[in-house]
Amino acid sequence: MANLTIRNLSKSYGAVRALDNVSLTVKEGKLAAVLGPSGSGKSTLVRAIAGFVRCDSGEILLDNRNITHEKPELRNTAMVFQNYALWPHMTIYQNIAYGLKLRKKSPEEIREKVQWALELVDLQGLEDRYPKQTSGGQQQRVALARALVVDPEILLLDEPLSNLDAKIRYRLRFEIKKLQKRLNITTIYITHDQEEALSIADQVILLNNGQIQQEDDPESIYSSPNNPFVAEFLGASNVITADILEDDQGLYVLLGGARLPVPRGKKPHDKVSIIMRADEVSQDREALGDSSFYTLKGRISEQMYLGAKRRYEVATGEGHTLLVDLEKRLPTDADIELYIHRDKLYIY
């Protein structure tokens, strides 16, 4: 296993800057989820680590070994692709053994390692089947076994569950997490699914337009976003543009009748972004205890049933619309009073 260090990595495709001076560190045995929208640079980053993309500048290091210009087969990394890339004319056994044969391992060693890998991903008894004779979840496990059987220093997963249905995807994400911890293998996990990233990662790296917007542990990056993009991307968020107002008491922003503070350096009539997550608003004032909170008032205009909760659209007196997730069933057109911790409402 190894520490992964990336320093000032950049890659352009014509006028498009896929990676823009990216630097990060993933410690040995940790699972880092690289998250972001389509076109953010996620796949370019993981393919650069694997050696399939040659970057314009920067360095990639495994521990103290610079692998920036090494060929893919010399890097001792292993990659699981989105479509699994299994050989259709090979059996499960042959697919898993393929990398070992390329490394010229003995037949006995190949048999031992393939058997170990089959047991690791719970595919014993399926080794003589072909990929088309297995389910999508089983194919994903074959691809994972093929990657792990060569004892890589870094495991690279490029949206490995995106082709599976929701129920299988939910189950396999935890199987991957348990397997990764059992093997203590440094792992880069590419995904566009924020729930997936937050649920399995030790470290979340959020990319947009080729740049790291924030890098932190899952709880910190969710609860303390450092810019509007992070706050909006992680969670069902309200993003409201409001004007800065001024009276005898100074500058303020108005939302749901609540007077909100203004970031430093702003002037009257400037605009700010107010961001609040739908699931961090409450109807229960007492549940907030003695903490400082804002009181927001409005009227329910629409609602949607989500199972355990309902999502309400709440129209405020200033003409804004808030999305709010609540357990209680309320009538449309009802007036409502909502409460939110001051540190859960972000103003940029």
Image: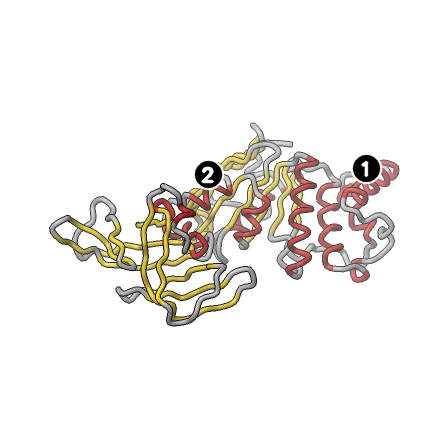
Kindly identify the residue that appears in the image at 68 percent across and 41 percent down. Answer: 178
| Residue 105 tag number | 1
Colour theme:
secondary structure
| Residue 28 tag number | none
Q: Do callouts 1 and 2 mark residues in contact (Cβ within 8 Å)?
A: no
Q: Is mark 1 on a helix, strand or loop?
A: loop
> Who is closer to the viewer here, 236 or 314?
314
Kindly identify the residue that appears in the image at 46 percent across and 41 percent down. Answer: 220
Q: Nearer the viewer, mark 1 or mark 2?
A: 2
Image coordinates of residue 269 in percent, x first then y, are 18, 57
Kindly identify the residue that appears in the image at 63 percent across and 38 percent down. Answer: 154
Q: Which amino acid does label 2 sit on?
A: Ser
Q: Mark 2 points at which residue?
A: 23
> Who is closer to the viewer here, 116 or 45?
116
Image coordinates of residue 270 in percent, x first then y, are 21, 55
Residue 57 visible at all: no
- How far is mark 1 from mark 2, CA to CA? 36 Å
Residue 278 visible at all: yes
Q: Is residue 62 left or right of residue 148?
A: left
Image coordinates of residue 253 in percent, x first then y, are 24, 54
Q: What residue type is labelled 1?
A: Lys
